[in-house]
Image (spheres, rainbow, N blue to C red):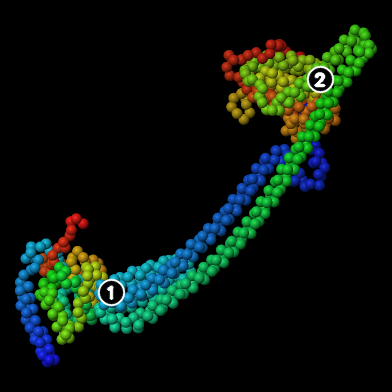
Amino acid sequence: MRTNRQPKVGWRRESTNSPAFLDRLLSIASRHNAGLLLLIVCCGVAVVGAFVVRDLQTTSAEAQKMYSGSVHGLQQIGELQYYAQETRRATLYALTTSDSNLQVEYADQSRDADQRVKDGIADYGRQAKSPRAAELADRLTRDWVSYLNVRDEVLASILEGSTKEAVSLDLSGGVPAFEIVRKDLNEVKRLYDADASLRLTNLVASSRRSSWRLIEILGFTFLLSCGAVWTIQKSQMLSAIQLAKLQMEFVASVSHELRTPLAVLSSAADNIADGLIEEKGALRRYGAILQKQSRNMGRLVDEILLFASTEDQKNRYVIRPIQTLQMIDSILSGTEGLVQGAGFVIDRFIEQDLPAVLGDPSGIAQCLENLIGNATKYGGVDRRIVLRAFVAPIERGAGREVRISIVDRGMGIDPSEIAKIFEPFYRSSRVVAAQIHGTGLGLSLAKRIAEAIGGRLSVVSELSVGSTFTLHLEIAKGEAMVETAISTSLPARSSYI
Amino acid sequence: MRCLTTFLVVLALTAWPLADAAHARLSLDTDPWAEQGAVVEPLVIVVNRSNPVEDLSSADLRTIFLGGRSHWVNGRRITLVMREPGEPERIAILHDVCGMNEDQLKTHFLRGLFTGEILVSPKTLASPAGVRRFIFNVPGAIGYLRQSDVDGSVKTIRIDSLLPGDKGYKLHTENRVTNENE
């Protein structure tokens, strides 16, 4: 069951031309169910999407700024031109009537309009971004004031009733002064057009840059997605191939495991049936062989059935407090035949006053029997197994727990294989080559059971030194609920079985 | 026939001033608002803010309002601004400053324009705001307003060194009638 590094899968050796990075990527994808890769791709797409959105927002903000600036600028220039004309129009309208009340009204309209022109010029001056614009704003202010001086005289003459004088004043001073203002306003418009044209050029360039960036990013995202999809599909295919391969190996292994005792049973039965065995002593020996082989077959079938029953993830165990010492005694008693049959002895080192643990007695027994059986297979030449039971602090948490360790001095496990030994059907080529029989289910089953009863299984191993498998169990709180595990009990602190 | 018409016009123009003077003397002896016991409000003489004049005597004021003076000391042409006939302010000015009634003033200006003694006739405006805006626009304008209608756009001048509200200030008009339901 315990294995050294098995070749990852057949494809890895076959595809030696693939780049190492790709190899590793596929391996990761295969090992972590492709979800991690998908998550990485999603994160990548999200980051890229964030960049795209930010870029689009920047471009959009620039366009909006330019549009609002253009609208505001055009509106400002339009208002300046309109109110300058309005100032002059209202002044000239005052000439068309001799009613003083109407003349005053026109004078007021003219003054309202000229105030708006003044405000507009002041705004333009404040917003001027270039020295030329600032100089133009100053000039416009001066020219407008010059026109207003004439306008005031014209208005005064109109209101006094001197229409002729007003017309003369307007022709001699008002018209030329207003013409200068008109030219200034036209220059403002030209300057604005030039500025808007420059901003438009910049915006077009920025938009083009943004488009290219978007195309690049989309292309990158597309390639990344294609790569991810390909990797995921490939990894899933490889996982399926690997699983199929493992299952084939499992079927072959089970067939072999079943065929061996069957062959023994068959030949022993044939010998007895053919009357070749008549002596009582020989018959007894044959009976023992038949008994042993049929037990082996039964155990193998039980193991397979148990694994199949744990596949659906349903928890069939009832968690309750158990007396630890009695439970260990019971398990050791149950495995006595197996251990002695393999020629092993178990050294017990059990801490005094062990507290009760939480778990299911049959589950704990199945788990520990698997570990002990495993140790008898790979335990090495000194044929000794150590069982330790003690209380220790919980790793990465508060409180304490009971640990039951099965220690052997066998071939050990390569550190790179530690993560794989709990996978179902996993058997390394080293183990297969050593002709150690097994189905590849024992450790996987032990781990599932340990987790199902609320504990966990850990392993520490060193090549050619040995391995220690530890079952971690939660301490039960409240002695009243503690029940004796199994009726069979053995002496508490005997050193050897 | 032509000679007869000319004779009649000259006779009429000669006779009217005599009747005007008699009527004026009669008017000056009585205050139209005081007689009725009405509540009065000072009437303010206002000019353009650029006008250098600060003080006018009653006689100067009468001369100006009767069109006897055409220019200010700074050379600006004097433009006389008045309210429409029948307005209390106009009645007060005619009575207190010109010593005339409406008909007499009309006759006075008709005769002055006809003989060439008066060059510009008064401008008539419908509202106090109109008077204010007119004076604001015309540097040589002079007119009158109730004290409550005066704002910073025009300049108040003293009459006989007195400002409205000073003891002895003579120009007043009846208080504006307001509808309490408004």
Residue A457 image position (x, y, % from top left): 69, 26
In-front residue for pair A392/A40: A40
Residue B108 image position (x, y, % from top left): 13, 80
Contact (Cβ within 8 Å) of mark 1 with mark 2: no
Mark 2, chain letter?
Answer: A
Identify the residue shown where x is 64% and y is 45%.
A42
Q: Is residue A91 left or right of residue A305?
A: left
Q: Residue furthest front?
A: B1
Tell me the element at label 1: helix
Dot 1 amino acid type: Gln
In-front residue for pair A434/A413: A434
Identify the residue shown where x is 60% and y is 53%.
A52
Q: Is residue A27 visible?
A: no
**Height in image: A232 above or below A387?**
below
Dot 2 amino acid type: Met
The mark closer to the camera, 1 or 2, is 1
Q: CA distance from mark 1 to mark 2?
A: 124 Å
Tell me the element at label 2: helix
Q: Is residue A66 left or right of residue A229?
A: left
**Height in image: A134 above or below A358?**
below
Residue A72 image position (x, y, % from top left): 46, 64
**Pointer 2 residue:** A297
Residue A103's disc number: 1
Identify the residue shown where x is 8% and y is 86%.
B11
Which quadrant of the view contains residue A89? bottom left
Which quadrant of the view contains residue A463? top right
Mark 1, chain letter?
Answer: A
Residue A154's disc number: none
Which quadrant of the view contains residue B80? bottom left
**Height in image: A259 above or below A41?**
above
- The quadrant of the rendering that contains the C terminus of chain A is top right
Q: Is residue A346 left or right of residue A269?
A: left
